[in-house]
Image (cartoon, grey):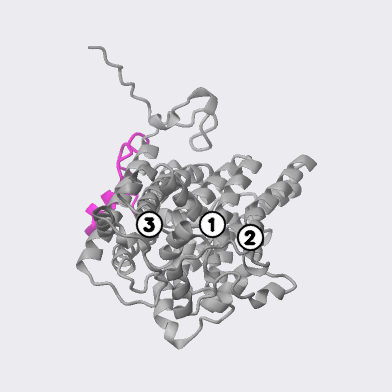
């Protein structure tokens, strides 16, 4: 039996990125299956799948052991007779349909029936609806549509969150210029405080995948490809519009440093339009759906009409809403304001103090990340990261390429804290901002350098597991970060799947 000899390489020799340094990118023309030679990449995929599986098992266990809270949440009637297969799916997947997940599942099954459904963007319902009505259609005799939608969402979010972790690893490699820091950050993403939202029928995993991949492509100067992924992010969540800022900053930076040309600026302009397009098209759809005369062809099941009468939901075209007459009729801003009371300082009420406490850890982490970076790079921040600064490291957390991600974090943190339901801030930031994971990776890397061992350039053993195994010897700040990630992962799963306040 012939075996391929194993070649031992010197620690300084790079096998993953041989052409342009240790972390800049793989020479795609030289290897079609480059990931098979990167043990770090493989471990990220493996750990992500393990975490998603564990989260799924936790939601099953907590849903069976703890009683559901009688929350005042959207709960549409289940149409059609249920079979034994439906009961089995509900037994294992009921926790995947809590809080906002009910809206996504309802839209995928019935479309945008009620006005407040239009606060939820269409990409996730379209994909899971396509999976349920396509590949899972042969199961229609055994499972009703909702059950197939639950299965579709579980599969989709498992795949998307795993690919998002891989994209974060690749993005960290080219941005931080440190494969180990990128690796540790990607592992932290796998067990992030918002792990339950990466598993249940929410759009966070889909959004993270589109955003991180778009940022990676932008860093590799593939502007139009990056814009295409950002466009998908906008189709998944409204805050995808903010990603246009990365394109603008990249274009302005190229002009300031005299590296840009008219063709590049035109590509950036088209890219920005592409990012905005899904939002504009969806708002146009909402206007047509709500404001134009009905053609009488809409067939709404009587049970859903009765629910609307009972709860006071506005059914499309039964009455024309006031926002249709606005000079700039945007359904999204009207719905967020009327149904969820979203607006500047509107959430600053004494009864919302528990929700501010839930968001306090991510606020502290965000503010400390911003302050640590800006205090170390005052000149770079004064020039908005547009000009080169001499004497500063080109890699690591303090590198100049990280500035735009810190600015992105600052914008989302400020807007989320002042204008949104503050408890949403945790999943907003952890599904959007790579720099949060890089900041935690930087702290852990600095505090616990022993996790890499003597085979620093050869091993892909999981440093996060090593940290947990050596818990008693960890520094205090390391324990706080890991405790926050693990605690919110477990507690958040238990609360969310039982309709307790974890939304």
Taking 73 as reference, is 120 left or right? right
For image coordinates 61% across by 71% down, the residue present is: 333
**Residue 243, percent from left and from top:** 60, 55
- In front of the other: label 3 or label 1? 3
Q: Residues within 10 Å of mark 2 (few under 14, many from 20)?
A: some
Give me the C-alpha separation between circle 2 and circle 1: 11 Å
| Circle 3: element type | helix
Secondary element at image label 2: helix
Mark number for residue 146?
3
Residue that badge 2 annotates: 285
Asked whether the residues under the numbered discs 3 and 1 touch, taking CB atoms below 8 Å apart as contact, a structural biologist would say: no
Mark 2 or mark 1, which is nearer to you? 2
Inter-mark Cα distance, 3 to 1? 17 Å
Identify which residue, 241 or 334, lies in the foreground: 334
Name which residue lies at 51% across and 57% down: 433
Which of pointers 2 and 1 lies earlier in the amino acid sequence?
Answer: 1
For label 1, the residue is 122
- Residues rendered magenta in the picture: 447-473
For disc 3, the neighbor class at 10 Å (few under 14, some 14 to 19, many from 20) is many
The furthest residue to the right: 262
Q: Inspect this view and state whether residue 305 appears.
A: yes
Disc 1 crowd, CA 10 A, few/some/many (<14, 14-19, 20+)? many
Residue 363, compared with residue 234, is above or below; it is below
Instruction: Classify mark 1: helix, strand or loop.
Output: loop
């Amino acid at each position: 039996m012939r075996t391929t000899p194993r070649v031992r390489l010197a620690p300084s020799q790079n096998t993953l990125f041989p052409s342009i340094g240790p972390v800049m990118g793989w020479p795609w023309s030289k290897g079609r299956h480059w990931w098979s030679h990167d043990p770090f990449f493989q471990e990220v995929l493996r750990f992500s799948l393990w975490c998603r599986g564990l989260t799924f098992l936790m939601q099953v266990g907590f849903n069976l052991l703890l009683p559901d809270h009688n929350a005042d949440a959207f709960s549409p009637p289940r149409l059609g007779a249920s079979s034994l297969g439906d009961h089995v799916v509900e037994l294992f997947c009921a926790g995947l349909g809590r809080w906002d997940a009910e809206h996504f599942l309802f839209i995928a099954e019935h479309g945008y029936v009620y006005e407040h459904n239009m606060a939820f963007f269409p990409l996730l319902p379209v994909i899971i609806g396509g999976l349920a009505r396509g590949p899972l259609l042969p199961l229609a005799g055994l499972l009703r549509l909702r059950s197939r939608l639950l299965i579709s969402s579980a599969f989709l979010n498992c795949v998307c969150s795993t690919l998002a972790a891989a994209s974060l690893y690749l993005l960290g490699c080219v941005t931080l210029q440190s494969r180990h820091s990128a690796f540790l950050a990607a592992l932290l993403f796998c067990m992030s405080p918002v792990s339950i939202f990466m598993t249940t029928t929410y759009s966070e995993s889909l959004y993270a995948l589109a955003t991180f991949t778009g940022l990676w492509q932008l860093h590799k100067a593939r502007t139009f490809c990056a814009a295409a992924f950002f466009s998908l992010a906008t189709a998944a969540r409204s805050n995808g519009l903010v990603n246009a800022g990365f394109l603008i900053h990249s274009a302005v930076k190229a002009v300031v440093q005299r590296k840009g040309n008219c063709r590049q600026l035109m590509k950036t302009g088209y890219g920005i339009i592409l990012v905005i397009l899904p939002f504009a098209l969806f708002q146009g759809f909402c206007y047509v759906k709500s404001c134009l005369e009905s053609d009488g062809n809409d067939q709404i099941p009587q049970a859903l009409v009765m629910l609307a009468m009972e709860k006071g939901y506005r059914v499309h075209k039964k009455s024309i809403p006031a926002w249709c007459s606005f000079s700039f009729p945007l359904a999204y801003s009207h719905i967020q304001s009327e149904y969820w009371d979203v607006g500047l300082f509107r959430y600053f009420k004494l009864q919302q103090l528990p929700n501010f406490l839930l968001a306090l850890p991510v606020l502290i982490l965000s503010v400390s990340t911003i302050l640590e970076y800006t205090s170390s790079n005052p000149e770079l921040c004064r020039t908005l990261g547009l000009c080169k600064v001499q004497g500063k490291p080109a890699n690591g957390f303090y590198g100049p390429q990280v500035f735009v991600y810190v600015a992105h974090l600052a914008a989302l943190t400020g807007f989320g804290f002042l204008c949104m339901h503050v408890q949403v801030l945790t999943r907003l930031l952890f599904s959007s901002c790579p720099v949060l994971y890089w900041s935690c990776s930087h702290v852990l890397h600095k505090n616990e350098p022993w996790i890499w061992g003597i085979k620093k350039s050869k091993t892909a053993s999981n440093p996060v597991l090593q940290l947990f195994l050596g818990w008693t010897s960890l520094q205090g700040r390391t324990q706080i970060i890991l405790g926050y990630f693990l605690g919110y992962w477990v507690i958040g799963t238990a609360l969310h799947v039982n309709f307790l306040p974890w939304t």
